[in-house]
Amino acid sequence: DSGVTQTPKHLITATGQRVTLRCSPRSGDLSVYWYQQSLDQGLQFLIQYYNGEERAKGNILERFSAQQFPDLHSELNLSSLELGDSALYFCASTTDRFDNEQFFGPGTRLTVL
Amino acid sequence: GQNIDQPTEMTATEGAIVQINCTYQTSGFNGLFWYQQHAGEAPTFLSYNVLDGLEEKGRFSSFLSRSKGYSYLLLKELQMKDSASYLCAVRLTYYGGATNKLIFGTGTLLAVQP
């Protein structure tokens, strides 16, 4: 158990819908990272937040947005869902912005039908 | 663009040694990481190299050559539980500044056989 929690564990929804994935970092960690893992593309970095501010951005679609709240939990919002958005979404956390070891949560499996 | 290459699959025998290679071509480099991921589970950190050479950590060792854009992960005394996907990742820098953005390879699926 890494200490990072993600909810929900599974999510099944339809195309065109909007969902919110939630992540709580390890106690004391200020930085949160979101990743998407699909079968054909591997683990893709989406976005990093540090203490509430966006710090780095990957190939995150405009239909996706994220934020980190004052209590340091983070939410990833996915809208206008498409079949291709079906994937495992992982959240990871570190104490600082540049820590070497990222601690990953168990992931949310999103299925878009 | 960023490019990280790893073999897709490898098979090895319990008790043996296996080497998983990773080559990279990225704009900026601030360290290379190896993660282990069992099917359906979260990746877990194995090792980190930022300078050339070998880092040893129990049964696992990782090597880096920055001039060649090359790394390998060496697993010794293989156990059945080592059957997993091994992900190579490069940490990028931007405009000379630090970042913790990781670019992952697609992973090498290792099957350990009895």
Image (cartoon, rainbow, N blue to C red):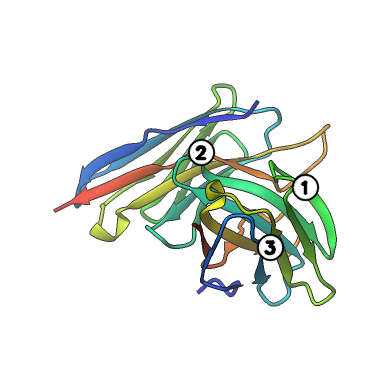
Mark 1 vs mark 3, foreground winner is 1
Mark 2 → mark 3, Cα distance in angstroms = 21 Å
- Is B112 situated above or below B95? below
- Is B19 situated above or below A113? above
Question: Depth check: A42 or A4 in front?
Answer: A42
Q: Residue at x 67, y 53 (%)?
A: A80
Q: What element carries label 1?
A: strand
Question: Depth check: B43 or B61 in front?
Answer: B43
Mark 2 vs mark 3, foreground winner is 2
- Answer whether labels 1 and 3 touch (C-beta < 8 Å): no
Q: What element carries label 3?
A: strand
Q: What element carries label 2?
A: loop
Disc 3 marks a residue whose amino acid type is Thr
Q: Residue at x 73, y 68 (%)?
A: A74
User: Which residue position holds label 3?
Assistant: A94
Residue A57 is situated, as x and y percent measured from the top left of the image, at: 75, 46
Q: Which residue is drawn at 57% across and 60% down?
A: A90
Disc 1 marks a residue whose amino acid type is Ala
Instruction: Categorize mark 1 by other alpha carbons within 10 Å: few (<14), some (14-19), many (20+).
Output: some
Which residue reaches farthest top?
B68
